Image (cartoon, helix red, strand yellow):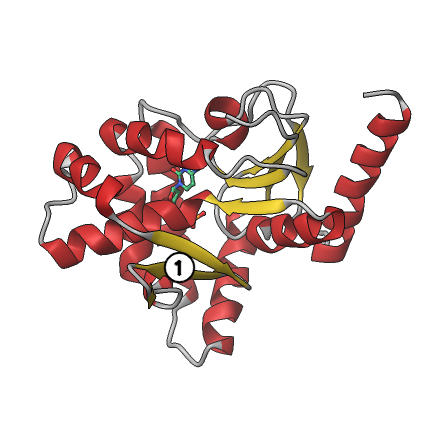
């Protein structure tokens, strides 16, 4: 694995993490890893192949043969086909969370994620980036927000896309996924050691980005 610097951003969904990670990566010229997209693509491919979502061994066997690419601008492709929209549906939210709880799947994705580390550096975004995948990361951030705020952000996103949604259903599903991500035995969602926590509930995306940049600049000046 390359020894290029890594910055990790972990936390539950709808904390603004994806957008924030992408803005920080752009500002400092680093590559970006959206690790959740890997679990989402595996869930989509497993559904299409008719593989049972509990069958970790079969999903792990399928994974190395998949051609998953990130051509830029947040797009994701599978075998040359643009699946950016397909992997963001409510059904895949649910399936990806199930696939992510399988130890065989997490194991097979580890070297794939390490492969994204290259000069000048990497911003890695997900749930276990700081705790498991890149434990030696230079800076680790853990973003949170209250479930109600996160559900209302997701609600607005769906309405903006012209999709139908009910806030109480979104809140219920989000809490269920949080529980599954936090309680799974392998790589549960929790802050890594040395992670700097940021509660984004009352902050704009720009304010969170500024905060992260300040932390990194402050530490750099301090010789870190
Ligand atoms: O960040 P996201 O919503 O795109 O992630 C999709 C699913 O994958 C979600 O249920 C959490 C899981 N995930 C994970 O377990 N570990 C990661 N590093 C990233 C995502």
Whether residue 169 is visible to the viewer of this picture, yes or no, is: no
Please report the residue visible at 16 percent of the width from the left and 44 percent of the height from the top. Answer: 53
Q: Quadrant of residue 218?
A: top right
Residues 100 and 173: in front is 100
Choose top left, top right, bottom left or bottom right for residue 222: top right
Residue at left 46%, top 35%?
Answer: 115
* Secondary structure of the residue carrying numbered label 1: helix
Left of 140 or right of it: where is 211?
Answer: right
Q: Position of residue 7 (x, y in %)?
A: 64, 34
Residue placed most toward the observer, 200 or 210: 210
Where does the image place residue 139, in percent across and percent down from the top left?
A: 68, 29
Residue that label 1 marks: 170
Is residue 24 depicted above or below 75 in this figure? above
Q: Relative to 152, does residue 122 appear above or below in the rendering? A: above
Q: Position of residue 144 (x, y in %)?
A: 59, 41
Is residue 128 something that shows in the picture? Answer: yes
**Residue 77 image position (x, y, % from top left):** 37, 61
Residue lying at the far bottom in this picture: please name it.
Answer: 162
Pick the quarter of the image with the C terminus.
top right
Q: Is residue 174 left or right of residue 125?
A: left
Mark 1 CB within 8 Å of ligand 1: no
Q: Is residue 223 above or below residue 145?
A: above
Q: In the image, 174: left or right of 197?
A: left
Relative depth, front residue between 53 and 61: 61
Badge 1 density bin: few <14, some 14–19, many ≥20, Cα 10 Å: some
- Count all numbered tags in the image, as a single digit: 1
Outermost residue toward the right? 221
Task: Give the quarter the ligand 1 occupies.
Answer: top left
- Point 42% across, 46% down: residue: 36
């Amino acid at each position: 694995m390359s020894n290029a610097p890594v910055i990790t951003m972990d936390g539950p969904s709808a904390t603004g993490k994806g957008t924030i990670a992408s803005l920080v990566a752009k500002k400092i010229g680093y590559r970006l890893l959206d690790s959740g997209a890997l679990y989402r693509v595996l869930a989509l491919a497993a559904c299409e192949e008719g593989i049972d979502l509990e069958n970790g061994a079969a999903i792990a066997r399928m994974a190395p043969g998949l051609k998953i690419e990130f051509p830029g601008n947040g797009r994701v492709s599978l075998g040359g086909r643009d699946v950016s929209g397909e992997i963001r549906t409510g059904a895949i939210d649910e399936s990806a969370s199930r696939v992510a709880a399988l130890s065989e799947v997490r194991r097979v994705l580890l070297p794939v994620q390490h492969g994204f580390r290259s000069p000048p550096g990497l911003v890695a975004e997900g749930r276990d980036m700081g705790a498991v995948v890149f434990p030696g990361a230079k800076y680790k951030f853990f973003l949170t927000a209250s479930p109600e705020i996160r559900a209302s952000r997701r609600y607005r996103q769906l309405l903006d896309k012209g999709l139908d949604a009910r806030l109480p259903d979104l809140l219920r599903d989000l809490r269920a996924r949080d529980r599954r991500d936090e309680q799974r035995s392998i790589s549960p969602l929790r802050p890594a050691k040395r992670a700097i926590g940021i509660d984004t509930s009352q902050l704009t995306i720009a304010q969170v980005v500024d905060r992260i940049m300040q932390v990194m600049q402050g530490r750099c000046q301090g010789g870190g």
